[in-house]
Image: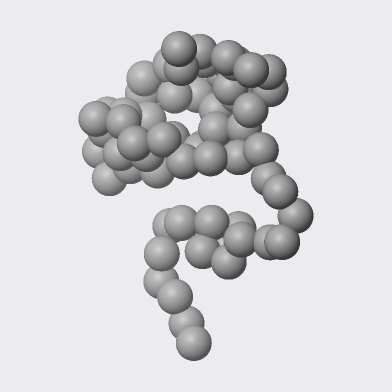
Amino acid sequence: MILYTTVPQEVIFPEEAESKQMVIDIKEGQLMVEQVSNQEFRVVRLISSDPFAYLNDNYTPGKMISLF
């Protein structure tokens, strides 16, 4: 089976081990984030078809965000 997608393999075929990564829906698409502490998350990647979303500094990989 061949999948033509921008979604990483880990999201399509999650491993048995518990991962601290999660996908969050945003207006421009989706953000994959990794939990660092109870309220802080690190941006892993942006998944979007909007080219202007990639110019937004808030979605830069490595950026720390708070969801609460």
Residue sitting at 41 percent across and 71 percent down? 4
Q: Position of residue 54 (x, y in %)?
A: 37, 30
User: 18 or 62, which is in the foreground?
Assistant: 18
Q: How is the image coloured?
A: one colour
Residue sitting at 61 percent across and 61 percent down? 14
User: 53 or 25, which is in the foreground?
Assistant: 25
Count of picture labels = 0
The answer to whether residue 46 shows anywhere in this view is no
Residue sitting at 24 percent across and 30 percent down? 27
User: 51 or 3, which is in the foreground?
Assistant: 3
Q: Say left or right for 4 vs 32.
A: left
Residue sitting at 68 percent across and 61 percent down? 15
Q: Where is 61 relative to 67, above or below? A: below
Residue 28 figure quarter: top left
Q: Say left or right for 10 vs 25.
A: right
Q: Position of residue 60 (x, y in %)?
A: 50, 24
Q: Position of residue 59 (x, y in %)?
A: 44, 24
Residue 38 figure quarter: top right
Q: Residue furthest right?
A: 17
Q: Say left or right for 41 vs 50.
A: right
Q: Where is 20 relative to 38, above or below? A: below
The answer to whether residue 27 shows anywhere in this view is yes
Quadrant holding the C terminus? top left
